Amino acid sequence: MSGPASRPSTGFVAWIEGLPCSGKTTLSRAVGEQLRDAGHKVEILDGDEVRQMFSPELGFSRKDREFHARRVSYVARMLARNDVAVMVAMITPYETSRQAARATVGERFTEIWLRCPVEVCRQRDPKGLYRGSPLVRGTKLTGVDDPFEEPLNPDLTVDTASGTIEGETRRIVEHLLQRGFVRPRSGG
Ligand SMILES: Nc1ncnc2c1ncn2[C@@H]1O[C@H](COP(=O)(O)OP(=O)(O)OP(=O)(O)O)[C@@H](O)[C@H]1O
Ligand SMILES: [Mg+2]
């Protein structure tokens, strides 16, 4: 992806997907902090917040979820081409949405799957999402009463059930370094 003056952009999109409570918010913030320390401009497009702002009229059908993901990928692309390191922290239950996001952003895109069994997510549940029925929740919950398609083509898979937050953060930063998206820390 080229910037306005057709020099290579230093921005990129890390699309971080996984079940509710798999760690998307936690890890995107931790990675974002490290990237800021290394001098990157960082924006995190995080699930709930972005949904309220971008798509308040949409529900949680397949069609609506896919449409919302398209809006997010378009904005992520715009930020990335202006040198922003973009972290998208979104469940993204459908493979079609992931592929569409990759196609929208282009080369400077990486898909990171936070793999975590639903039982572990249920135990963590900091927002109480897994408690109660769909009626109580007011919406269907991915992994419980709505599907999560196993990602077919993630660039990185991180098992968030077994590791530590620090170790997982390091894994993701190393992956971004390997991809050439992130510059190594200068000095010490
Ligand atoms: N190894 C780990 N990796 C990630 N999160 C962990 C880990 N161990 C415990 N946790 C905890 O699991 C919870 C994950 O919640 P988080 O809000 O980050 O998930 P999420 O994927 O953003 O969920 P949602 O889709 O509901 O926004 C946090 O409370 C975090 O502290
Ligand atoms: Mg979250």
Image (tube, helix red, strand yellow):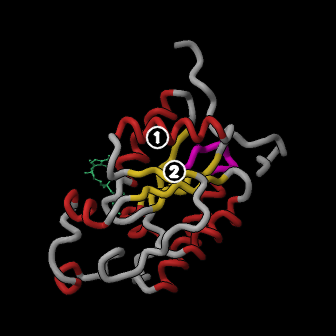
Cα distance, mark 2 to mark 1? 7 Å
Q: Residues within 10 Å of mark 1 (few under 14, many from 20)?
A: many
Q: At label 1, which amino acid type do we have? A: Gly
Query: Residue 167 placed where, x, y %?
Result: 40, 36
Res 186 → quadrant: top right
Name the residue: 84% across, 45% down. 6
Image location of residue 34, percent across then percent down: 46, 32
Q: Check residue 159 for magenta coloring.
A: no
The residue that disc 2 covers is: 87
- Note whether ligand 1 is within 8 Å of mark 1: no
The residue furthest front is 162
Residue 145 in the image: above or below residue 177: below
Q: Quadrant of residue 120?
A: bottom left
Label whose residue precedes the other's in the sequence (2 or 1):
1
Residue at image x 48%, y 78%?
A: 65
Q: From the image, tell me which residue sits under label 1.
A: 32
Label total for image: 2
Q: Residue 27's spot in the image, x, y percent?
A: 40, 46
Work out whether residue 44 or residue 172 is closer to the camera in this orientation and state it: 172
Disc 1 on helix, strand or loop? Answer: helix
Q: Nearer the viewer, residue 90 or 162?
A: 162
Vertical order, 2 against 119 (above or below): above
Q: Give the range drawn in magenta.
A: 79-87
Q: How crowded is mark 2: few (under 14 residues within 10 Å), some or many (20 or more)?
A: many
Q: Are marks 2 and 1 in contact (CB under 8 Å)?
A: yes
